Amino acid sequence: MSPQLPRGPIKRRGLRGAWRESLLLADGRELILRPIVGEDAASLRAGFALLEPEEVRLRFLHPMRELPEPMAQRLAHPLPRREFALVVAEPLPPGQAWIGAVARASIDPDGEQAEFAILVWHCLTRLGLGKLLMKRLIRWAKLKRLRCLYGDVLEENRAMLRLAEQLGFRREHRDQERGMTRVVLDLRASAVGKSRAQHG
């Protein structure tokens, strides 16, 4: 995958199977949006090595030289019913495909809310993938009938904060973790508002 991609609208096409889409880039190349599978663990580790140090810090909130094997395996094996993870990858078999974006949501023990995390490799930024992935996480959370979806973001990660604001998240500053902002989307309130708009 080239480190430089032309900017332009992505053409999307649904594929057979849940949460699967073909994404056609402006230069004609194709990526696949799909649920993560266990075979993706090796690709996650390989892709991690291509990340810039700043990308790692903004996503994992601290420096990391590599993605440990246990962590890669954990990410590639979401817990059934409680976790959800999607990847944007090359149209190759899992384990062989380069992965350029990952999105994950995990339901808290209270069963009422879920925490999200999204990482888009720098060579795929400004294509709208972050927004697409976040919308998929929101849809999943609503299907789970959760109260809210939230994430902790470094205040300097302006791109993620802007995206969250565009999608209706509110900001909650947390004094106990200086430099961190929690963004929260009230799923039930947004559902009520949408219903009223449709019937108004």
Image: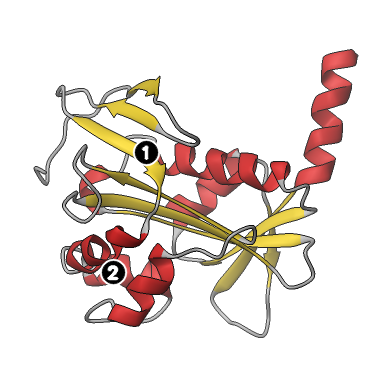
Extreme-bottom residue of the structure: 176
Residue 129, placed above or below residue 141: above
Q: Which residue is pictured at 9% across the width and 42% down the height?
A: 2
Q: CA distance from mark 2 to mark 1?
A: 25 Å
Three-letter amino acid code of the residue under disc 2: Glu
**Would you say residue 172 is visible in this rendering?**
yes
**Would you say residue 63 is visible in this rendering?**
no
Q: Quadrant of residue 124?
A: top left
Three-letter amino acid code of the residue under disc 1: Leu
Relative placement, left or right, of 172 versus 122 is: right
Number of the front mark, 2 or 1: 1
Q: Give x and y (percent) for residue 159.
A: 43, 51
- Disc tally is 2
Name the disc covering residue 33, or none. 1
Q: Quadrant of residue 168?
A: top right
- Taking depth in this image into account, of 173 and 34 the one nearest to the observer is 34
Helix, strand or loop at disc 2? helix
Where the N terminus falls, by quadrant? top left
Relative placement, left or right, of 72 versus 30 is: right
Name the disc covering residue 52, or none. none
Relative placement, left or right, of 179 versus 12 is: right
